[in-house]
Image (cartoon, rainbow, N blue to C red):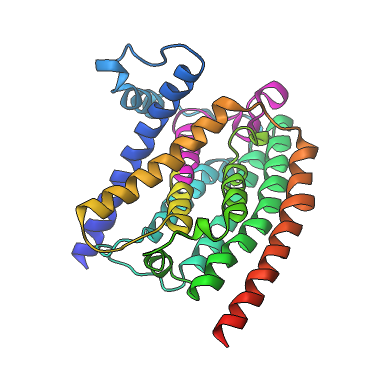
Amino acid sequence: MYISIISTVFTYICILLAVAFFTLLERKGLSYIQIRKGPNKVGFMGLPQPLADAAKLLTKEIAKPTMANYSPYFIAPVFSFILALLLWQLYPSLYSCSYFKWGILFFLCVSGMNVYGTLLAGWASNSKYALLGSLRAIAQTISYEVSMALILLFPLFLVGSFSFIEIKESQEFIWLTFLMIPVSLMWFVTCVAETNRAPFDFAEGESELVSGFNIEYGAAGFALIFLAEYANILVMSLLSALLFFGGSSMILIESDLAFMFKVLFFAFAFIWVRGSYPRFRYDLLMGLTWKGFLPAALSFLLLVASLSSYLYY
């Protein structure tokens, strides 16, 4: 029991450090994409910048808007942060203290609850900008969760298991992305939209909503909201590498390092997309999922289900 608790705490500390330095990677990556330097004043090459930002945010006075609903206002960032950490229980390692046989169902349940953190933050702030941002984020997230759930059925049908570890092990000889390249591309776009990242960051449209659903948050609340967002980016990168570019689960340093490089590639792809494309129009975004991804996913799913039933029987 004590080993499990220590392992969980150590895992969460590593996640927080990874999220902190991922923000630095994003700022440096975007700066070089835009031909500038980025953070380079704090310490050597700006490496301690995330620690300085964390110290600044956590020591600032917590804002208390006069008209806000205080209980949900303070609960929303903590709720989002807890859900983001819960998703990291799905990490497919043989060193893990917990083994999820129904990992896909757990992922769908927890990721489906993320929308409530955004809803609480926008509604409890009692600001029209925050409320508009949260409503747009809810519509966007729900629409993309439909296609995301359908896309998750593809590896499930091909492997015949709800476990992420078994899906990873099944790709010993061929990656699933080679069997369904259009579906893997749809999955990545869905991940970008699901995490409210540019070019799909309508919940935080600075030019329209000032800062979206988090406009009334500062200090620790602001830090928790963005820790949750970046933790979700990393976990979606992890699942992308696992579902479509998996491989051996043998306890070898080389295989673990190779898998981590895949995760880092997908994490950097989020930054690359943000620095390369302008923001979509909102109606085009909603049309993309309901008129594009949903029919395509259903068509591919019917084909894969027919082939799977034929092969099994």
Q: Quadrant of the N terminus?
A: bottom left
Query: Which quadrant does the C terminus fall into?
Result: bottom right
Q: Position of residue 125 (x, y in %)?
A: 64, 36
- x then y, percent, for residue 139: 73, 47
- Residue 160: percent from left, percent from top: 50, 76
Q: Which residues are magenta?
A: 204-233
- Residue 312, how many percent across, how many down? 55, 84
- The foreground one among 308 and 193 is 308
Magenta: main secondary structure: helix
Is 182 within the magenta?
Answer: no
Magenta stretch: residue 224 in it? yes
* Rendered image quadrant of residue 252: bottom left
Q: Residue furthest bottom?
A: 313
The residue at 42%/15% (across/down) is: 38
Up/down of 17 relative to 97, above or below: above
Look at the picture and state if 161 lies above or below 201: below
Q: Give the mark count.
A: 0
Q: Is residue 116 visible?
A: no
Q: Which residue is more in the foreground, 92 or 80? A: 92
**Residue 37 visible in this rendered orientation of the protein:** yes
Q: Is residue 260 above or below residue 300?
A: above
111 sits left or right of 146 in the view: left
Q: Residue at x 62, y 57 (%)?
A: 148
Q: Which residue is depicted at the point 29% across and 44% down? A: 14
Name the residue: 60% across, 39% down.
Answer: 196
- Left or right? Give the position of 210 relative to 74: right
